Image (cartoon, grey):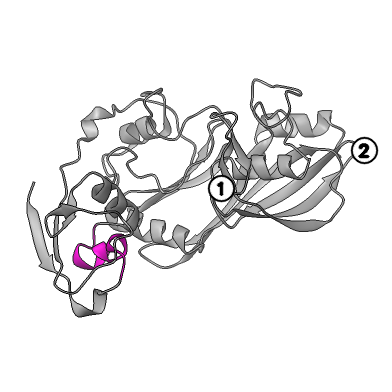
Amino acid sequence: MMVSQQTIEDQHIGERIDKIMSYYSPEISRTKAQKLIDEGHILINEKKVRPNYKCKKGDLLSWGIPEDNPRNILPEDIPLHIVYEDDAIIVINKESGMVVHPTHHQTSGTLVNALLHHTNQLAFADSERPGIVHRIDKDTSGLLVVAKTDEALNILLEAFKKREIIRKYEALVHGQVDHEHGVIEAPIGRDPHNRLKMSVHDEGRYAKTYFRVLHRTNDYTHVSCELETGRTHQIRVHMQYIQHPIVHDPLYGNGRNKHPKGQMLFASHLAFRHPLTKEQMEFTIKPPAPFEKEYKILGFK
């Protein structure tokens, strides 16, 4: 691993170290910088610091990027529903039941395993989640964008942080939602009583969801939700918070109507500026078959 060094320049005095790393090493995104700092690969004055360290005059910045080893994740011949692909990105319609990237508990059968079989051109700025810009829950289907180059990955990650990427979902929820549209603004964090769940509480991170009613029956509502933030299980937690949990949600549906196809939620719309061409890209998909079937069963027309 080659180590680079640079004395902090005057214009960066007072700035966070994780923020300025892309200036000195453009291939390092802020997310990647935070990981490298935590692992001790980015140092100030040859000492480990925190990602929020604010640079001082005369600080010596040292950094090295360990070689990624994508061979730890094996390619697998798993069918993919590709909506769009070019030299920089792939837009996938992920099926319900598929985990996005390998974890300690699941090392195969993921979207990343399938992507590695599909293409040998995939961003490896993060070897643990190659190409992954954002995630969708295992039992939620729908649209997500994957980066094929590190440049595309870094640009898309920055766009997500700036909330420039539009993500809309559709859901079937319990009860009649009274208002035609609204905003749920409530912090989400790990549930202190159940580590498998997230919940709304004061120690959580800021989270904001917009919703709009599409259709109603006597007992259920079909809603469209747009994310401003991207917290884990955000729509599921926020809909439960306003007492309209998602149909068949095994974690947040109060144990009602568990279903092998997972919760009635899918990522229906994705819009963003192409990381290289800057063209505005927009994708919309139809509801998956289980969603359409449940839609009719619940009495929607």
Q: Which residue is mark 1?
A: 203
Which percent across, then down, holds residue 157? 40, 56
The reply to whether the C-beta atoms of the residues labelled 1 and 2 are less than 8 Å apart is no
Side (left or right) of 75 relative to 92: left
Comparing marks 1 and 2, which lies closer to the viewer?
1
- Type of amino acid at the residue the image marks with label 2: Asn
Q: Main secondary structure of the magenta part?
A: helix
Q: Which residues are magenta?
A: 15-27
Q: Which mark is residue 294?
A: none
Mark 1: secondary structure: loop
Q: Quadrant of residue 277?
A: bottom left
Side (left or right) of 288 relative to 278: right
Which percent across, then down, holds residue 104? 36, 25
Which percent across, then down, holds residue 99? 47, 30
Side (left or right) of 45 relative to 219: left
Q: Residue at x 35, y 64 (%)?
A: 276
